[in-house]
Image (cartoon, helix red, strand yellow):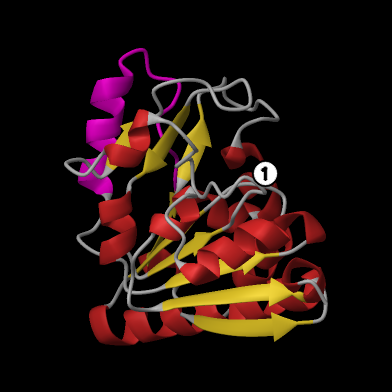
Amino acid sequence: MDLVRVADDEEAARRASELIIDAGSKALAERGEFNLALSGGKDPWRMVELISEANLDWESTRIFQVDERIAPAGDDDRNLTHMVEALPIDLQTRIRPMPVTDEDLAAATARYAEELPDALDAVHLGIGPDGHTASLVPNDPVLEVTDRKVAITGGEYQDRRRMTITYPVLAAARMIVWLVTGDDKQDALAKLRAGDESVPAGRVRNDAMTIVADASALGG
């Protein structure tokens, strides 16, 4: 995988946004649509703001969620809450929210899977200090799901069950951009770069992955 070293989190957000915008321009030119999937957490908020400023054909763009917490609409735990805040109002309609408030979560995951394209044009991923990515979390049965594009975690992680896209979707994506900042990510980032399958992130396989990491995450 490629590594882009940057000085700080602002430069990381800018560089990651440029990679995703380039992927969007290419997808729109070649296929007439752009299918992007964004992860949650705090790291991508600035990146999402920068992407929203791009001169893309937004009417032909769909923004999917990589993962989401099972929580009420508008809850501060929801990734969607912060994604909406990072996007201008005219682009919020481009989001395809994960249906985590449905009573029948099994049916909800199947429905969301049907919305996904055969191959996402770009996927943004982050990584936690414990090596999780998306909501593919350590020691959870969701790590072994290979027959579905979308799944629910078997148990709670940080007090919430989660809905997440699965490894097969990540493997099929046309590109993956990892955005990794902060010194608490040093160990997890090293394992990701080594393809260490002891952490969930290390199990992601794709031929077109770029890591954008700041000096803190890289240990200087």
Residue at left offset 28%, top offset 77%: 32
In the rendered image, the vertical position of residue 115 relative to residue 175, given as above or below: above
Say which quarter of the image contains residue 180. bottom right
Residue 164 seen: yes
Which residue matches tag 1? 82
Residue at left offset 38%, top offset 79%: 208
Say if the magenta span includes residue 110. yes
Q: Position of residue 67 (x, y in %)?
A: 47, 42
In the rendered image, the vertical position of residue 56 relative to residue 182, given as above or below: below
Residue at left offset 62%, top offset 48%: 83
Q: Position of residue 69 (x, y in %)?
A: 53, 30
Count the marks: how many?
Answer: 1
Viewer-proximal residue, 88 or 197?
Answer: 197
Residue 152 seen: no
Label 1, secondary structure: give it.
helix
Residue at left offset 68%, top offset 73%: 213
Of the 4 image quadrants, the one containing the C terminus is bottom right
Q: Position of residue 58 (x, y in %)?
A: 46, 68
Viewer-proximal residue, 65 or 143?
Answer: 143
Read off the magenta span: 96-115
Say which quarter of the image contains residue 142. top left
